Amino acid sequence: MNNEPRQNPYEVLAVEKDADARTIKKAYFELVRQNPPETHPEEFRRLREAYELLSDPEARQAFDASAAAQADGPESAKNAALQEAINLFEAGDKEGGRKVLTRLFIEQPDFHDARILLGRHYFFEGDFKQALTEFDALLARAPEHWQGHLQRGWALIRLERLKEAADAFWRAGKHGPSEVSPRVALADCLEAMGQVADALKVLEQAQALPGVSRMDVLALKVRRIATMLEHGQDADAAKDLEKLDAELPQDADPELRRWAGGQLSAAAAHLFAQQKSQGANRLLAFGRRFNPESATEVVYPTCVSLDVEALPAVTREWLHSEAERIGGWRSPTNWLTPAGFTLAFTTVTGLLFAHCFLGTAERSVGDWLWCALFAALFSASTWAVVRYLLRVLNSPYGTFNTIHPLHLVQVAIDRITVWPLVHLQDLNLVNHQENGVYKHTALEMKFNGVPVVLNVRGQKTAEGVAQELIARHRRVLELLGRGMLDAESGVEHLPAALLAQADANGHVRGKGSILSWPQLVAAACVGVLLVGVSAWPQMRRVEAHTWTRVAAQPGLGAVLGYLREHPETRFAPQAQARVDAELAQARARIEARLDPNSAAAPSRAFFSGLLDTMSQAHGRRVTVAWQASGDGWKDDPSEQLVAAWQRMLDEVLGQGVVVVDGGRGAAREGAPVMTLRVRDMLAPASGSNRALRVWAVSQEGLGQHVPAPALELLTDAADPRAAEVLFHEWVDRWHLPGAGGRRPLLLTTSTLAQEAQP
């Protein structure tokens, strides 16, 4: 129970009893500037209570009625009883107040102010049916009492009897022809019924009421504009806003312009409550033309992210105190996780660059592009985690949430995210469980349609946070609607001017802060540059590794393959020198084995040409291509030919110097340096019925100067040893080892089948 004597709001604000709303507001803000809440908290409380009472038309009317009870004259007794009931209601003695008013009805049945007071008492207590009963009783005795019809309409609205409420408001306007409040109530009722056009018409007609003040006209125009914005008539609202601006030019009464700005803020508060944030911000932006000095009647972004470095000193002090109160200081858990990620990404990035610099595998252009891509990704990622770790280590804060008088504030290390409470929508609590055990409660909400989730441990704690958010949201809209938000304690901690500095992405960055994307791009470029720098030494390392591996292998195959694949490397001369040395040994073997007394001695030029071709073409593959022409051949001597040539070349040049195949050699040996083509066909013998078997022999690859001319070899096709005869004639004509009847150096005179045996 409040035992303090009731203050006179007119005396507190030093205004007359007939002062209008603009005068009252002007006096209030002037006194608040003289008595700020930081230095004069008690006086500020008295000023705010007085302004709240006088800025509410109904509360002011009730106060004026109670104050009249102290006047002298014949009405003093009734007014004294009325004041007694009011005092009992304020003291919490509801039953006592009702008894006083009931007794007053019996004594003075036509004292309608007492009936209205009792009806409003029931209304504020939530007993709308009893309130309606009292207003009906009043109208039964005074059918033309416009205030009775008005109060009855409000009770009917709470009972969701909108059509009857509209009729009551219409009757209130009929019996109060110059009163604005019944028209506004009727417009609100019609709007709730979906008759927006009719509501706009009523508001427009109310502007032409007899005796209506200019301030009331401006208020009606603002109300009409807000209704348009609420129902999507943005174009019409824009036109009316421009008309309003023209009606109040820069040289108009400054107080009237500020008052109009306050009306726009009140309409914006209504739109915020209806979750029409875009329209509300539009009104606030327009209202800045009339009231640019206000610190809170500004456009509210949905969300703003601010670097702690960008915060003014007063905001940092408040943030420090909130961290102290909540326990939001940095803890080991805040830096251990980013430290682990930093170590992991640094290790992976280092291994990647080590692979780029020290790898011994040969890479194509595509491989280098992939390396550059991964280097860019891991370099940028490493820089991001390193930067985040530095942010964590340089900031004293951890992560926590707090509620500012105007905003929900989320603190994350060195950055805060501000969500203005005017945009708060759809707050729900969801309990999360795991295996039937409670884990935490999620506060799911939206700010102008943007979802936000706060995870809170403890159901009671979560309910307390939700209740505080809802209460703050309501208070912000209430104070914004009354034009009192500037005087709210704590608004200076996050000034609107600071939020207005946000860039297009909603960020307010510190002076030394660099945009994140350029940093990431720069880190990625450094990674790509390092890969590019590693390309040349890595390719030289690959050359050295490849040559070392090739040089360690015996024989000519690996060296010749290296020269074919890497003809221009720095190790090509060494490889060529080794090839030439190996071939020189083969030449020496020819000279030693095919002496001038041998029947095969003339073939030295043939073998020398083969070795020269091998040295130049960097190959050692010889192909024997046998092709049968015509029908009737069942034997295929190609395998025997390949085996015979392989043995002959191995014994002349040395094991592994030359590889012979039938045209299907391994790709690693490259193209053949010599191709021996044998076309096997039948031809009739002249002057007889015998058929001749013909081998058309030619070689490709050694050039014309080599003594291996094209041959056409003939023998009897019926001879079962025809292939052997033809092969020996081939050997004889080319002077190869095994020719003639003399004992050859390398091959004995034998059959082709014997030659082919290992």
Image (cartoon, grey):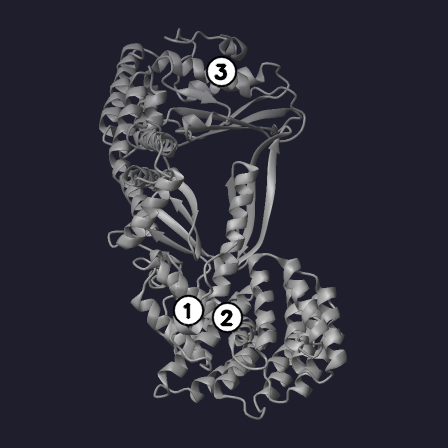
Q: Is residue 348 left or right of residue 540?
A: right
Q: Are marks 3 and 1 in contact (CB under 8 Å)?
A: no
Q: Is residue 423 left or right of residue 176?
A: left
Q: Residue at x 49, y 19 (%)?
A: 642
**Comes first in the chain, label 3 or label 1:** 1
**Residue identified by numbered label 2:** 268
Foreground mark, 3 or 2, reads: 2
Q: Residue at x 42, y 12 (%)?
A: 738
Residue 71 horizontal/vertical position (percent) = 51, 78
**Residue identified by numbered label 3:** 643
What amino acid type is highlighted by mark number 3?
Answer: Ala
What amino acid type is highlighted by mark number 1?
Answer: Glu
What amino acid type is highlighted by mark number 2?
Answer: Ala
Q: Are marks 2 and 1 in contact (CB under 8 Å)?
A: yes
Element type at mark 3: helix
Between the residue at mark 2 and the residue at mark 1, the CA separation in whole angstroms equals 9 Å
Image position of 686 with respect to 368: above or below: above
Q: Nearer the viewer, residue 234 or 174?
A: 174
